[in-house]
Amino acid sequence: MLLYDLFVSTACIATLEVDTAPFKSIGLPYWAKAGAPSPALPLWCLSGSAIETMQLLAATDCVGSFDAVFIDADKAAYPVYYELALTLLRKGGVVALDNVLRRGHVIREWKHSAAGHDVAGAAAQTDAAAATAAAAAAAAPAESGSEAELKTSAKILHQLNVFIAKDARVQHCLLPVGDGLLIATKL
């Protein structure tokens, strides 16, 4: 709603959902309750793979046209979402990644990994993680919260956090609120 209020005359909000039913039954009523004028608000709820949808958008004239992208999805695919978001964002646009501390597992990963002492190595590992994240996301079960899933996603998120810290394309801030929120502005 805050973003809508900021861009009321030009706002167009898209949500990418694997299953649109929860958004339609839960999200839209809250949106209306908050006072969003539904006829005047371009609000798209797109169903299917977010990666595939973002890739399609990136292959069109949407490149460089987004003001903001909020990512709260399959953690293993965050590196792919991040790169696609940067493609879609305009200069000065903001990408926010939720849950980047993964219930403290990312901190434990940093403490126990060689990458915690070798930032360049972690950035190189992030490149490799981004290349395989789409396949891993497709093969992985829904976020079950199992210990194995938490460890795997913690490694990927740790590598991504380090990569973004060194990414010259953005200015970033990692906020230790909730489960961690990383905000990056495209330069």
Image: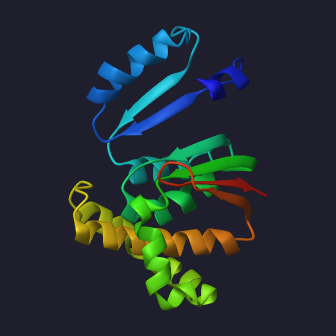
* Image position, residue 131 (x, y; %): 44, 75
The answer to whether 185 appears left or right of 88 in the picture is right
Q: In front: 81, or 147?
A: 147
Q: Quadrant of the C terminus?
A: bottom right
* Image position, residue 28 (x, y; %): 40, 18
* Image position, residue 144 (x, y; %): 22, 56
* Image position, residue 133 (x, y; %): 38, 69
Q: Is residue 7 visible?
A: no
The image's colour scheme reads: rainbow
Quarter of the figure with residue 148: bottom left
Q: In front: 101, or 52?
A: 101
Quarter of the figure with residue 19: top left
The answer to whether 185 appears left or right of 30 in the picture is right
The answer to whether 103 appears left or right of 14 in the picture is left
Q: Which residue is pictured at 73% across the width and 62% down the height?
A: 170
Quarter of the figure with residue 18: top left
Q: Which residue is pictured at 63% across the width and 68% down the height?
A: 164
Total number of numbered labels?
Answer: 0
Q: Is residue 71 visible?
A: yes
Q: Which residue is pictured at 44% across the width and 85% down the height?
A: 112
The answer to whether 127 appears left or right of 143 in the picture is right
Q: Which residue is pictured at 31% across the width and 62% down the height?
A: 137
> Is 123 located above or below residue 2 in the figure?
below
Q: Quadrant of the N terminus?
A: top right
